[in-house]
Image (cartoon, helix red, strand yellow):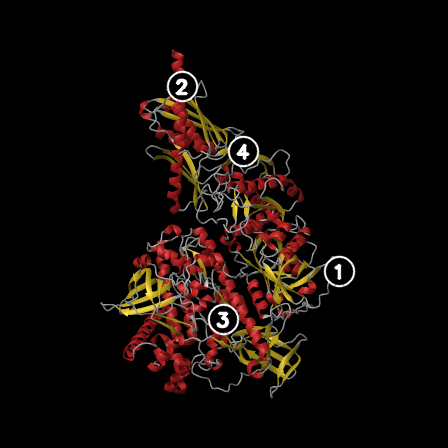
């Protein structure tokens, strides 16, 4: 009964400095117990874990590792390696990392412990009666720390009945000598010996890594981080009083050495200055690096500068960039100076040696080399390595350690090499590292905990499980529609008429949570990956293949577990009733988009049979019936979704535009073509059903768990971002009303140029850029009026329909099942945990998006590299959408890319086209208004308006240290002459040269035949809003858009 | 103070307790001879002395006398050496006055006041060392002193504090936990009937979590009751043994 049994009270004296700066002696009590859990599966005395989510030490390791304080502080990076598991961090070490290290270091340590795959724990040795060592009077801190750590190592060894050896790592020689031979099988090793003996065979580069860290540590001065900045209390006081402001430093990619901006965090918004704050030049940036959380001091108004409006080429060596004239500059904006850094956000950087680096020649400090980061925004990094010659042609991974006040460049160390520059694998690896995506093989332990399904060991339904589920195998016609060749089918649909005449619509989603339970390795791995990453030529799954493309994938003709949402709709398709729950389904057909669309459009039966493998073995007399049944279902589905979509659009849902490019690879992995992705009505049908399901699930979980439901919201766009859109629209005489999503949708719909379908697309894509980013959040962390989804015009929205690809959906599945009483709600994560997780998932999604875009750019470059300069591919039509002082931004619909085009070169010459379309670069100047830019020279004037079509030539700008990029050159002021006439679907169909599906082509053909040449006009007036773009995918890609500006 | 983790992932508080564990309680009854009742209590490092005089006639102005029940007069004070920095004023400041009021309300509700109309009971509480939960320790000490004085009460009054840190309720919070700015709930109950005599809350706590925190605090008061009850029984058996030997 008495709580305090088994506890021993003692006291600890501390000397602290109080708020007034006086030294005070403080006594704090400490309670010690003998039952601090050891969290080891080898334990004989049944230590109980405090809570089930804590990780266990692994059972399959040869030894446990106890690092001492200095090792944990200086070599945490080595302990972070995924191969090294079973680390016991003592409380003493954690405190030392916290007080003598930094908060960032502490967070890294905590991340090791939270990462279930590392099998590492924090052990509260100071609360354990037998581990604790009282610090003796006059005992130096290091000595006491080492003593405590050693006694913990010893205790562990004895507690686990000598079943497993324990290794204590130390960096100091004396400690090693002191404790080396005290107990057998409790080894005390220096970190170098340890790595050499245990790991050098497994991880070949580990000793190099050790040396480069050790080297970097030697050069580190103790108080490096604080020199040149105001002390932290001054910063905090200044922030409170409003004298300083804080925000994340964002370096301008185009002008990395001069311009950086700080987006203000919401608190210090004053009405007079809404915009970002400029930090001009490297010295004002005061050793902060892109992404750091910095504190700024505003300069007096007289020293405010303005941002450059000129286009700038990224140069390998930035030389002489200050040649700007006054007319390049826009109005001056608030300018500030970095006075402190609250949080360093350094990550791993991909770097390479500059091409002409000479090895150590004339360099007194041997082996010091400057490397150039792949990311333009990061300054060069000084590393010390002796392998310059070996690594000259390689991309390498570098981490920054410090930046001393008297140095131009930060110091870093070499971690590992990624591969040869120009090699596809190395470039892909670079893309992944730059976006902080870590995708390795799935660990063996994870594969083992999952059920297997192969010829020897097939997977069966569990009869107990079957009983608890609603069986839809025979009652419903269930089918899936996905892209061709899709392996991870996570959504299926069903429609049928009920006896009372109402319609029943069902969305059946793969039941991933049945296989992935909280606390499993798979769950942890999926959580840390958060999403499947799709690169242009490959994908990195979130779940192991046995789940993602087999047991969870709702392929046809096999029994699968599902989570279903089933609505009963009345004749006007209003929802009467909704049912959520676990089901058992067997999909009848696995269709692909083109086929489903074709069936809707009236593809004849023989063709259908050819395309659906499920119909191969059906007797001919049943065949007709089956096909007409399926066809009717698809038509019905499309009808329902049209209605649902209409309802949503009338509430103000936006239709936006982005051109996605599909890389078509041939068998040998060379690039066949780049084609913009196509959209058909059936895409929208599926999307609409998914949005509908997501919406209803969101409603349910938000009702049941008002403080801890995972939803997705899309905040209002920033109004000042709409300038470009307004300018462009004004050229064509359209007016954009941006006051609400409905108004915006209407003005976008009205802004159609009958002669040029591209205009509307450009406007929509500009609108997309102005959108803010949709994000996951926990309902407990935001006020209710922020739950809405602006783009979809819904009050609640979440992600539910792709649990194979997104971790958020898994969480939502668990919440839904708890909401309907199938799961115990104790498995749910609390509000705070969920909010942290939501921001992790948001971050991962964003980086997956960036990685996808980067990889597409990479492939674009490869494509043009292979094609060389053939006109057929390189000379394309482009549309102007933004004006700058020395050039214009254009969009190239054929390849779905944007880029700058210069009208004025570095020598100040401007471009002029003669009548016979000869180009000449001559002296002249440019004048710019809101809507046009004019070239003035001795021959006369030439004006470029927004939304004009021009012809550009694409060339490849090869780069050594950075990613290669495309360069657009002006070829003609006129739109490109197309050999083909504009076809029904306007711009889009003309630019698609390889139509991937025959069915689609046929459809376009039939449409055109029926309506004749007026089709395009009619289509715009009466047609479905088919070709406007995929909303569902689009809101996914908003994140992407935010980058472009 | 920044960066202190009040509750680690492993479920330990800064001083090594689990969220539901009380600090160590040590107490003695009858430590002063002159007072009618007295007690000393240590809850962790919070140390409190209590002395009770009465019931006796009303001292001072007669007008204060209540015709149907006893007047409970309390005084709360903190020794100048009780805190990390020496206090200037041991009693009479705002905080002490408030505490005095609260103590009075609490004991008004717990003592069977109707038994002694037109008389007075004095309860003096002195905090010798302060380390969080001063009010709770004061109530607990005063209860013991009232028992020692032999004044009839409805039940023991036991007080306990609780807070809410990273989604977990924690009981009997120390000074460090108090001063971190989280919510603080103080409750005094009659443990047997689970009636709440006194409830105070500082800073914000979400409604949904209130019942969790309150339940834990009430459980804390029961645990305190258990300790106090044992101490009282031990004291009584000692005293009676002593008196028996005295008589023989």
Q: Where is residue A85 drawn, in percent x and y?
A: 54, 52
Do marks 1 and 2 both belong to one polypeptide chain?
Answer: no
Q: Where is residue B116 drawn, in percent x and y?
A: 33, 22
**From mark 1 to mark 2, how far is it between C-alphas?**
89 Å
| Letter of the chain that mark 2 sits on in the rendering | B
- Per the image, the residue denoted by label 1 is A363
Mark 3 against mark 2, which lies toward the viewer? 2
Mark 1 against mark 3, which lies toward the viewer? 1
Do marks 3 and 4 both belong to one polypeptide chain?
Answer: yes
Residue A296 visible? The answer is no
- Per the image, the residue denoted by label 2 is B239
- Per the image, the residue denoted by label 3 is A766
Disc 3 crowd rating (10 Å Cα; few below 14, some 14-19, many 20+) is many
Q: Is residue A628 above or below residue A36?
A: below
Disc 2 crowd rating (10 Å Cα; few below 14, some 14-19, many 20+) is few
**Quarter of the image where the C terminus of chain A is located:** bottom right
Disc 4 crowd rating (10 Å Cα; few below 14, some 14-19, many 20+) is few
- Per the image, the residue denoted by label 4 is A11
Q: Earlier in the sequence, mark 1 or mark 3?
A: 1
In terms of image quadrants, where is residue A714? bottom left
Q: Is residue B226 above or below residue A942?
A: above
Do marks 1 and 4 both belong to one polypeptide chain?
Answer: yes
**From mark 3 to mark 2, how far is it between C-alphas?**
89 Å
SS for callout 3: helix
Do marks 1 and 3 both belong to one polypeptide chain?
Answer: yes
User: In the image shown, does B248 or A196 lie closer to the viewer?
Assistant: A196
**From mark 1 to mark 4, how far is it between C-alphas?**
56 Å
| Letter of the chain that mark 4 sits on in the rendering | A
């Amino acid at each position: 009964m008495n709580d305090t049994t088994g506890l021993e009270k003692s006291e600890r004296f501390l000397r602290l400095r109080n708020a007034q700066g006086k030294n005070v002696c403080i006594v704090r009590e400490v309670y010690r117990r003998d039952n601090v859990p050891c969290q080891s599966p080898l334990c004989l005395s049944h230590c109980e874990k405090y809570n089930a989510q804590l990780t266990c030490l692994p059972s399959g390791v040869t030894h446990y590792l106890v690092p001492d304080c200095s090792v944990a502080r200086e070599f945490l990076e080595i302990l972070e390696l995924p191969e090294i598991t079973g680390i016991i961090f003592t409380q003493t070490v954690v405190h030392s990392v916290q007080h003598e290290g930094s908060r960032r270091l502490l967070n890294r340590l905590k991340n090791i412990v939270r990462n279930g795959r590392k099998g590492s724990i924090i052990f509260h040795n100071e609360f354990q009666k037998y581990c604790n060592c009282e610090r003796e009077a006059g005992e130096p801190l290091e000595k006491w720390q080492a003593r405590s750590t050693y006694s913990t190592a010893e205790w562990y060894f004895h507690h686990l009945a000598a079943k497993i050896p324990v290794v204590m790592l130390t960096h100091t020689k004396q400690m090693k000598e002191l404790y080396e031979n005290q107990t057998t099988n409790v080894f005390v090793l220096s970190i170098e010996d340890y790595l050499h003996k245990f790991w050098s065979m497994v991880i070949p580069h580990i000793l190099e890594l050790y040396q480069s860290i050790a080297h970097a540590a030697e050069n580190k001065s103790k108080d490096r981080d604080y020199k040149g900045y105001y002390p932290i209390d001054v910063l905090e006081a200044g922030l409170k009083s409003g004298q300083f402001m804080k925000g994340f430093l964002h370096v301008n990619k185009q002008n990395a050495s001069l311009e950086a901006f700080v987006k203000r965090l919401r608190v210090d918004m004053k009405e007079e200055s809404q915009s970002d704050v400029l930090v001009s030049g490297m010295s004002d940036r005061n050793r902060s690096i892109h992404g750091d959380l910095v504190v700024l001091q505003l300069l007096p108004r007289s020293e405010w500068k303005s941002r450059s409006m000129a286009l700038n080429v990224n140069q390998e060596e930035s030389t002489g960039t200050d040649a700007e004239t006054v007319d390049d500059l826009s109005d001056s904006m608030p300018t500030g100076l970095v006075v402190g850094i609250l949080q360093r956000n350094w990550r791993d950087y991909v770097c390479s040696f500059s091409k002409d680096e000479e090895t150590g020649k004339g360099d007194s400090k041997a082996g010091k080399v400057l490397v150039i980061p792949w990311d333009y925004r990061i300054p060069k990094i000084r590393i010390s390595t002796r392998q310059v010659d070996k690594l000259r042609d390689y991309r390498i991974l570098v981490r920054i350690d410090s930046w001393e006040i008297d140095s131009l460049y930060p110091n870093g160390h070499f971690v590992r090499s990624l591969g040869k520059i120009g090699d596809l694998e190395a470039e892909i690896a670079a893309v992944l590292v730059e976006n902080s995506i870590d995708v390795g093989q799935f660990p063996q332990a994870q594969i083992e905990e999952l059920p297997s399904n192969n010829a020897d060991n097939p997977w069966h339904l569990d009869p107990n499980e079957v009983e608890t589920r609603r069986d839809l195998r025979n009652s419903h016609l269930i089918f899936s529609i996905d892209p061709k060749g899709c392996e991870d089918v996570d959504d299926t649909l069903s429609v049928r008429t009920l006896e009372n005449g109402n319609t029943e619509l069902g969305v059946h989603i793969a039941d991933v949570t049945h296989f992935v339970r909280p606390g499993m390795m798979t769950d942890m791995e999926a959580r840390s990956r958060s999403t499947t990453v799709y690169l242009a030529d490959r994908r990195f799954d979130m779940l192991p293949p046995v789940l993602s493309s087999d047991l969870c994938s709702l392929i046809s003709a096999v029994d699968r577990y599902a989570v279903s949402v089933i609505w009963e709709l009345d004749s006007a398709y209003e929802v009467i009733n909704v049912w959520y729950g676990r089901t058992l389904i067997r999909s009848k057909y696995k269709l692909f988009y083109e086929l489903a669309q074709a069936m809707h459009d009236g593809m004849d039966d023989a063709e259908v049979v050819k395309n659906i493998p499920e119909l191969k073995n059906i007797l001919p007399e049943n065949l007709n019936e089956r096909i007409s049944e399926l066809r009717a279902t698809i038509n019905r589905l499309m009808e329902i979704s049209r209605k649902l979509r209409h309802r949503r659009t009338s509430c103000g849902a936006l239709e936006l535009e982005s051109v996605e490019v599909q890389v078509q690879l041939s068998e040998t992995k060379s690039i066949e073509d780049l084609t913009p992705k196509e959209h058909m009505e059936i895409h929208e049908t599926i999307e609409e059903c998914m949005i509908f399901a997501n919406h209803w699930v969101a409603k349910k979980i938000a009702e049941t768990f008002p403080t801890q439901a995972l939803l997705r919201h899309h905040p209002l766009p920033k109004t000042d971002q709409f300038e470009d859109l307004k300018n462009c629209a004004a050229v064509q005489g359209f007016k954009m009303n941006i006051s609400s999503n409905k108004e915006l949708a209407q003005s976008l719909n009205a802004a159609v140029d009958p002669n040029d379908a591209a205009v509307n697309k450009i406007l929509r894509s500009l609108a997309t850029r102005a959108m803010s980013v949709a994000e996951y959040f926990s309902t407990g962390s935001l006020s209710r009026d922020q739950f809405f989804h602006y783009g979809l015009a819904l009050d609640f929205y979440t992600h539910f329909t792709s649990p194979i690809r997104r971790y958020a959906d898994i969480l939502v599945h668990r919440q839904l099942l708890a909401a309907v009483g199938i799961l115990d709600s104790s498995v749910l994560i609390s509000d705070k945990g969920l909010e942290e997780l939501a921001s992790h998932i948001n971050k991962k999604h964003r980086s997956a998006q960036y990685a996808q875009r980067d990889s597409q750019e990479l492939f674009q470059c490869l494509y043009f590299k292979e094609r060389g300069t053939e006109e057929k591919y390189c000379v394309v039509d482009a549309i102007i959408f933004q004006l700058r002082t020395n050039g214009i931004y254009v969009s190239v619909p054929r390849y779905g890319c944007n880029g700058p085009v210069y009208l004025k070169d570095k020598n100040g010459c401007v471009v002029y086209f003669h009548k016979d379309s000869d180009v000449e670069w001559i002296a002249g100047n440019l004048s710019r208004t809101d809507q046009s830019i004019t070239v003035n020279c001795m021959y006369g004037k030439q004006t470029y308006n927004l939304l004009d079509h021009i012809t550009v030539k694409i060339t490849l700008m090869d780069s050594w240290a950075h990613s290669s990029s495309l360069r657009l050159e002006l070829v003609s002021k006129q739109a490109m002459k197309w050999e083909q006439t504009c076809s029904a679907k306007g711009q889009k169909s003309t630019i698609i040269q390889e139509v991937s599906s025959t069915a689609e082509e046929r459809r376009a053909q039939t449409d055109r035949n029926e309506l004749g040449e007026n089709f395009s006009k009619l289509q715009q007036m009466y047609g479905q809003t088919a070709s406007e773009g995929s909303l569902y995918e689009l809101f996914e890609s908003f994140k992407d858009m935010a980058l472009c500006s | 103070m920044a960066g202190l983790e009040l509750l680690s992932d492993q479920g330990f508080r800064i001083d090594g307790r689990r969220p539901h564990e009380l600090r160590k309680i040590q107490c003695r009854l009858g430590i002063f001879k002159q007072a009618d009742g007295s007690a000393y209590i240590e809850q962790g490092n919070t140390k409190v002395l209590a002395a009770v005089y009465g019931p006796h006639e009303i001292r001072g102005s007669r007008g204060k006398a209540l015709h149907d029940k006893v007047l409970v007069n309390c005084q709360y004070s903190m020794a100048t050496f009780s805190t990390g920095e020496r206090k200037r004023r041991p009693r009479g400041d705002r905080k002490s006055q408030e505490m005095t009021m609260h103590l009075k309300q609490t004991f008004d509700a717990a003592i069977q006041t109707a038994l002694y109309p037109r008389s007075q009971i004095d309860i003096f509480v002195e905090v010798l060392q302060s380390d969080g939960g001063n009010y709770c320790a004061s109530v607990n000490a005063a209860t013991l002193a009232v028992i020692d004085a032999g004044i009839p009460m409805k039940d023991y009054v036991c007080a306990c504090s609780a807070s809410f840190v990273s989604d977990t309720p924690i009981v009997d919070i120390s000074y460090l936990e108090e001063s971190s700015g989280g919510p603080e709930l103080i409750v005094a109950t009659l443990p047997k009937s689970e009636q709440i005599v006194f409830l105070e809350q500082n800073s914000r706590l979400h409604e949904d979590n209130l019942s969790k925190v309150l339940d834990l605090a009430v459980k804390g008061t029961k645990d305190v009751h258990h300790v106090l009850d044992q101490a009282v029984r031990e004291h009584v058996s000692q005293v009676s043994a002593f008196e028996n030997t005295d008589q023989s």
